[in-house]
Amino acid sequence: MLVMMENRSFDHYLGWLPGADGKQDGLSYVDRRGVRHQTHHLLATDGCGFEDPDHSYEGGRIQLNGGKLDGFLKSGENDLMAIGYYTDDDLSFYSGAARDWTVFDRYFSAVMAETYPNRFYQHAAQTDRLHNSIDRCSLPTIWDRLAAKGVSGTYYFSDIPFTALWYGKYAGISKPFTQFLVDAAAGTLPAVSFVDPRFLDEESGLSNDDHPLADIRAGQSFLNQVYDAVRNGPGWEHTVLVINYDEWGGFYDHVEPKKAPDVSRKTALRGFRTPALMISPYARRGHVSHHVYDHTSVLKMIEWRWGLKHLTPRDKAARNMAEALDLASGPDLSSPTYDVPDITPAACVPDESKSADWAQLKRLSIDLGMRPERW
Amino acid sequence: MVVRSVAALVLALGGLVLVPASSAPAGAPAGARAAASRPAAYVPPIKHVFVINIENKGYDTTWGDDSAAPYLAKTLRAKGVLLDRYYATAHNSQPNYVAQVSGQGPNPQMQADCQVFTDFARTSTVDPNQAVGSGCVFPDDVPTLPGQLSDAGRTWKGYMDDMEEPCQHPEVGAIDPTQKATAKKNYAVRHNPFMYFHSIIDRAGYCKKHVVALTRLKRDLRHVGTTPNLAYITPDLCHDGHDAPCADGRPGGLATIDSWMRRWVPLILRSPAFRRNGLLVVTADESDGPQADSDACCGPVTSANSPLPGIVGPGGGRIGALLVSRWIRPGTWSTTPYNHYSLLGSVEEVFGLPKLGYARDEGVDTFGLDVYNRYSPS
């Protein structure tokens, strides 16, 4: 089971975690006007009033600056939000879950580019575009590999089905989030499931995918809901839940991403680190893994488990995330309960000059008859 | 991607009606002509700025992987920083050039490329220093970048490809005969913004000295002392890609842009003035056309004399700009939104001059260390 959230870097979100390679207080960055600013604790749980930090193909390269990693205030319209961080006090799910389960502090977004390219990597181990667009995708995916072997797989979406970008090919395996809750409770989840949060209304801070300007409490609540559904379901004993993020969202991080084997030199460079957690009766408790992983390591784990052929040179060369599991010991079915409030975020004042890529994909998915369940 | 949409424009228009026009007396000098001051710390000590505009090419057309101008999109691009969110301010051509040298916004006659070389009939002036009215040739007291440079003891020249005589323009009130190229004549007045200011064309000696044929550039580049602080270069209707094919049968378009760039840009890059402290800017006047892209990134979504600067939208579309300098790292990006008013404001910052017109708009940013990315302020 995979949950892919949106747009947070490791240092920004989990830099406080003991035993992990995170940096929060004490870093500083020079802005476009030559003024130096210190990293700082973000005081608000939403991003209202800030600019969504630049996380484009080009912006990532500005931030990387040839390995100096000093450009986080020099790309796009980045403001001080980009060098702000949250601590465990702000994250009611992670404050417990990150300490209790396995966290990865060398997990990188697959490609130094924005959302769609990274989400394509999650489904297909490559991307056919460098920027978000709703052109038809024809890349072969993990869903094809699973289907060919007769292994069940379902893509569960909260509002916008990312699979709509294959123009109907995966309509049959794309189901609403409520169905996920039903399947988890009934023990009828497929062998492989991807679960996506609510993407719409990122600009007004009302989504629960953690994408700025979202209120991060909504993301924590969503993750806790998925966690509870999985651990309380009859299939828990045989479940591995991975939580990852599509990309770093333009937030600062102090670890340089490197190139990986890839279909193209253009997309070989990974993006900055993102938070990643592994939760399972077989997961090491209170553990931090320091090995290099990216989105295709999740594919590698699926391919390893069900004997599937790799999709591209990237997932072929990727480390298998399952190596972080402790398969030698028996399953430990215990799981802590986290006290995560379910909140209703207050909307930011909408900036109508921001165009939303998700709104385009929403229209496409309606045209395809892939009915998003919640508007 | 952040773009100003038509929806945002409607809101802004609603707001505009409520703002009383701040009136400056029509006869008084409308612009601050203060002496040059010390540039900001983030601005490198650039002393020579070269600006080249090509015609009617959107970002992907010019700079994309499949660009038909490989020298421009690959060879030259590898030498500098590509501003991938640089936008034109209007449609069609003429108001974009005027924006770069004065910060004045478009009006319908300008948007139609000033088919007739009419006087600009001014009724008032509103913030930020916009002449209100209609027409093409601005009154004598409307300030310009050339005027600022001359007042500050700096030098400038417009180098106009295929211009037959210095300061070539129609009589005021006459039809512009250069709207369409012929087999022998490819100069277009509407791509020569200096002709639209009485403060320049009414001083014949000054104008002829400053707005010269492109062929003159070669000689001027030989020495630092003969290279102006601002060299504003406009290729002709064939060389700037406006025509394809050209009136005389040459291919035109990006293919001809590329061969022109191959010939002229190395002369600039090799010149002592550029090498010592130069900055080269290559951009386009506007995107492929109003229907193709009339978005704006920043700054005014409407202007004093036009509710739709881009005819069907708020701007002239995304075009990109490439900047090359010793203070810029090769093969890099800037993703900060800029437009032609930003270019004006940035050139003014280089020379320590106050900003003119819409370069003063609070939504218009100027180049910072994202662009001058090899410069360390001391």
Image: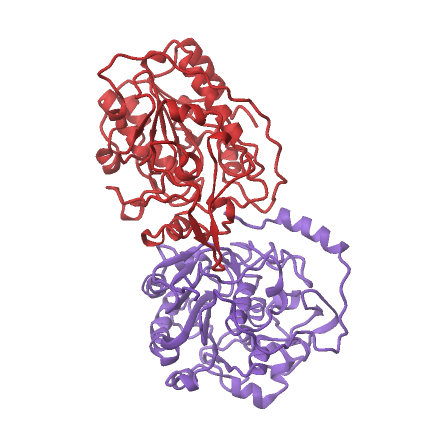
Chain colours: A red, B purple
Q: Quadrant of the N terminus of chain A?
A: top left
Residue at the spot x=34%, y=52% of the render? A68
Residue A323 image offset from top left, x and y in percent: 24, 25
Quick check: A27 above or below B340? above
Instruction: Report the number of numbered marks.
Output: 0
Q: Quadrant of the C terminus of chain A?
A: top right
Residue A198 visible (yes or no): no
Asked whether, in this view, residue B87 is left or right of residue B219, the answer is: right
Residue B25 image offset from top left, x and y in percent: 77, 74
Quick check: B187 above or below A46? below
Asked whether, in this view, residue A276 is left or right of residue A73, the answer is: left
Frontmost residue, B208 versus B67: B208
Frontmost residue, A188 versus B336: B336
Frontmost residue, B68 versus A328: A328
Quadrant of residue B294 within the rendered picture: bottom right
Residue B351 image offset from top left, x and y in percent: 52, 74
Residue at the spot x=68%, y=67% of the render? B130
Quick check: A195 above or below B310? above
Residue at the spot x=62%, y=71% of the render? B114
Residue A253 image offset from top left, x and y in percent: 39, 43
Residue at the spot x=27%, y=22% of the render? A325
Quadrant of residue B93 within the rendered picture: bottom right
